[in-house]
Image (tube, rainbow, N blue to C red):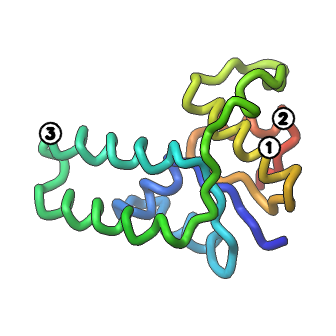
Amino acid sequence: MNRVYLDTSAYLAVLLGEKQAASVTKKLSNRVLCSSTLLLIEAERNLVHLVRLEKISTLDFESAYTQIRKDQEAFLLRDFTPDLCLTRHFPLIRTPKSADMVHLRTAQWFMKNGGLEEFISLDENQLQAARELGLPVN
């Protein structure tokens, strides 16, 4: 199997070299990286937001953007299509934001179509929702 689902929070930590990057990177070693194509636009949007707030330089923005383009080849990406929309699969307690729900449903699709070893996120609410949906969370 060796497949993990990576949501945007975890990807951005690695991309931007945040303090959690080392622990996330360790989980990604020798794994097939699965995600939604939503990850690409969320990562791009976050970079634009950070450069506009001057939290990263234009040079760092360009470097990170180039890395996203390269990384996209390393991912097994799934488009968000109508079959993932009206499934009635929601976490028992939490009602995630729409973008988070896209990641959860895409991860469920990967789980049913080849399996996943782990759903990786740095968002505790997202991890709890993943647990409630039966996704593998460590």
Secondary structure beneath label 3: helix
Which callout, 2 or 3, points at the residue further toward the start of the chain?
3
Looking at the image, do the residues carrying marks 2 and 1 touch, with CB atoms under 8 Å apart?
yes
Q: Residue at x 34, y 60 (%)?
A: 16
Residue that mark 2 sits on: 133
Q: How far is mark 2 from mark 3, CA to CA?
A: 36 Å
Q: How far is mark 3 from mark 1, CA to CA?
A: 34 Å
Q: Is residue 110 left or right of residue 18?
A: right
Q: Classify 10 Å Cα crowding around label 3: few (below 14), some (14-19), many (20 and above).
A: few
Q: Amino acid at mark 2?
A: Leu
Which callout, 2 or 1, points at the residue further toward the start of the chain?
1
Q: Nearer the viewer, residue 52 or 25?
A: 52
Q: Nearer the viewer, mark 2 or mark 1?
A: 1
Q: Whole-percent x and y of residue 115?
A: 86, 59
Q: Whole-percent x and y of residue 45?
A: 32, 40
Q: Amino acid at mark 1?
A: Gln
Q: Whole-percent x and y of residue 41?
A: 41, 44
Residue that mark 1 sits on: 108
